[in-house]
Image (spheres, grey):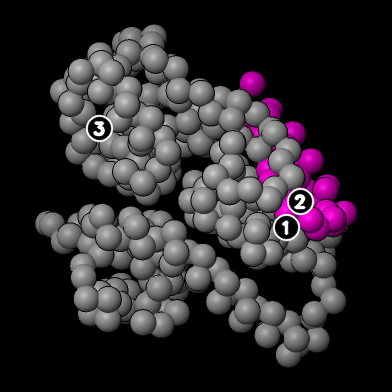
Amino acid sequence: MNLKQLEAFQAIMSTGSTIDAATRMGVSQSAISRLLSQLEESLGFALFLRRKGRLTPTAEAEAFLPEVSGLVDNLQRVQRMADDLRLGHSSRPLLRVAVPTSMTQQCLPRVVAEFMQGRDDLVIELVTGSYDALERAVLDRSVDFAFVRLPTELPGFEVMPVLKVQGVCVIPQGHALCEKPVIHVSDLRGIPLVLLGRQRNLRTELDQVFRQASILPNVRMEVHSAGAACAFVAEGLGVSIINELLANDFLSLPIVTRPFVPALPYSFGLVFRSDIPRTALAEEFSALLSQRLIASVR
């Protein structure tokens, strides 16, 4: 396997299609398909099921994604550092931030644009992935800090709590459930669901909620990010349950959200390595990010 193949896989998982992945990478759709086939051949197992022209990630793909994301980000970082050294730009100020993938579509770009005003030399490197991958990125010094769910899975952090939110039910516009002001787990009996993959903490909590209600969830799709969940809900493939913070970033889609009962509380914060002093840039950006995140759920 090589970097291009891994980048193609990551792009397909992020966008949901070879067409959008090709656009993101600036190559043809046939090139993306070829890179994916080469990667699957080298791995010896399928990453996607091909049904009626659509790609559905396999369980192996979901498990493979966090490690691939970390590796691709690190290799890209090495390449950028080499380019900066070659061009004599190694002295430019650099801020390295890690966030969940879904935050990069609306929330984070606005904060970054605000922060970079008047900082023409600043370079921001962004790492995305699952919360455990983001924690590892902080611990291995790949980033200055990360936005994660609390409590952390790993030790060794200085933690800055930011906000608490609840899980919400995401529903296609026009769905019968939209008439309800609150969605109870019993309302989802037999309803097609679009849920985060089984390796996610939220999925574990949801499975427990369904078990306690003696309901077998009708899972129609499993996805790897809140953004993907909202996109598939918008296409009418089912309803989902995700945290309010990330759901708010996708309300431009034809979806609505409703409170979910029983409550699924979430605590989020920023984590830094406890044995490394924060840079001034990290202090300033983390403060701005915290302020904007808090404001987004008020």
Q: Position of residue 258 (x, y in %)?
A: 41, 18
Residues 199 and 164: in front is 199
Q: Kindly check if marks 1 and 3 are in contact, taking CB atoms under 8 A apart as contact.
A: no
Residue 172 visible at all: no
What's the mark number on residue 144?
1
Position of 3 relative to 12 (above/below):
below
Which circle's residue, 1 or 2, is located before the other in the chain? 1
Part of the protein shown in magenta: 270-298
Residue at image location 20% in from the left, 21% down from the top: 215
Disc 2 packing (10 Å; few <14; some 14–19; many ≥20) = few
Q: Earlier in the sequence, mark 1 or mark 3?
A: 1
At label 3, the amino acid type is Leu
Q: What residue is rendered at 85% in x and 76% in y?
A: 91
Q: Residue 207, how many percent across, how many down?
A: 30, 30
Residue marked by disc 2: 274
Q: What's under tag 1, amino acid-wise?
A: Asp
Q: Please tell me which residue is depicted at 50% across the width and 70% down the height of the picture.
A: 71
